[in-house]
Amino acid sequence: MGLYSGHFVPSWKGLYTGNLRALITLFLVAVLAIGGWVAWQVYAPITPPANTSLLLRPGFSTRRIAAELKKAGVIRSERVFWLWHVLHHRRSLKAGEYLFERGAALPQVYGRVARGDIYFHVVTIPEGYTMFDIAKAMEDSGLGPAGDFVQIAETQTNLISDMAPQATSLEGYLFPNTYQFTRTQSREEMAAAMVHQFRLVAQQIGLGVSSNSSSTSSSNSDVSKIVTMASIVEKETAAAEERPMVASVYYNRLAQNMALDADPSVIYAELLAGTYTGALHHADMAVNSRYNTYRFPGLPPGPIGNPGRSSLEAALHPDESKFLYFVSDGNGHHRFARSLEEHNKNVAAYRRAMNPGTVNPGTVNRTPRPR
């Protein structure tokens, strides 16, 4: 019997088949492992840190967007995100601010960025807010430092040059409303949106302001005068039905060359100077500012706040009256008077209502004060 005869002869065919099966098995295991890893990368939700906010600026490449998402903990892999983008026909990704509040898988994240499902900061501007109040509201809504917006309001007067060529700020033309802004917008764009809203409302009430800055159908002086008057009226009463009467008082005083004696104008003078402490005192009436309507006759040089629609309408269409004075009645409305004597009686009634049983309650902060 030969040395290599019988069952001792190795089967090269069998050995080859066994190795091939092992390689195929390893390959399939590798494919399954890679597929499982990719599936996990793509479909397993990832929970980012609470309320993760991410700003994707215009011009960011897909790779930069993927890197920012990975850095923020919103996706697991930049390469998988880029591959998903390629496989989905390279849909354009939208710039903007995105807020991720809950866990999401990569397709959900990608879909939001592809749709432009951006986060808007809601800013509510109440009627009568000054540009300083608006700037603080913008800051509180996460839209940047208040000082930055004040700077825009004080320098971008080109936005209203057709209406108020002498204006030193946008005060009066930043219309009170609820706005939605994103941090990709510039502060100039935000201010322009408020001015645009003013133009729309002014057109609707017949103020004669164009919807753009190319023209006005009313004279510049008329528009500026009405907005300034409206800003005073806005500050004087919260009762919309009273505003045409309040406007008539001030127009009557102007017609008789009487000082307006409007406390809110003094407050605004001190706001501009940075000296307002939250309350007016007798000494404040002497502040040397053109906005002080106790010292300087006529309307102040510009608005003292940003009036709403009803105050603009009141300044545009005041009531016809002979009233020259008014004082609070203590219940959110006012008593009006034609003479100083009648006004003093109303003041006394107010004091009694506010301080029952008190003989001398002291001075009352009322507007206008008789001179």
Image (spheres, grey):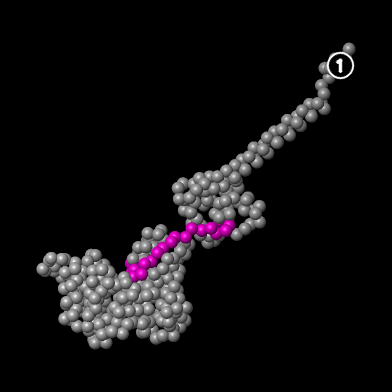
Quadrant hosting residue 354 = bottom left
Q: Which residue corresponds to mark 1?
A: 6
Residue closer to the observer: 319 or 102: 319
**Number of numbered discs on residues:** 1
Q: Is residue 252 magenta?
A: no
In this orientation, does residue 283 appear? no
Quarter holding the N terminus?
top right
Q: Relative to residue 3, is residue 258 drawn left or right?
A: left
Magenta segment, which residues?
A: 113-132
Quadrant hosting residue 128 = bottom left
In this orientation, does residue 102 appear? yes
**Residue plotted at (39% across, 86% down):** 219
The answer to whether residue 282 is above or below residue 11 is: below
Question: Which residue is most to the right?
Answer: 1
Q: Relative to residue 269, is residue 9 drawn left or right?
A: right
**Residue plotted at (32% across, 72% down):** 239
- The amino acid marked with disc number 1 is Gly
Residue 259 image position (x, y, % from top left) = 22, 81
Few, some or many residues within 10 Å of mark 1 (<14, 14–19, 20+) = few
**Residue plotted at (41% across, 61% down):** 143
Residue 262 image position (x, y, % from top left) = 25, 76
**Residue plotted at (66% across, 52% down):** 87
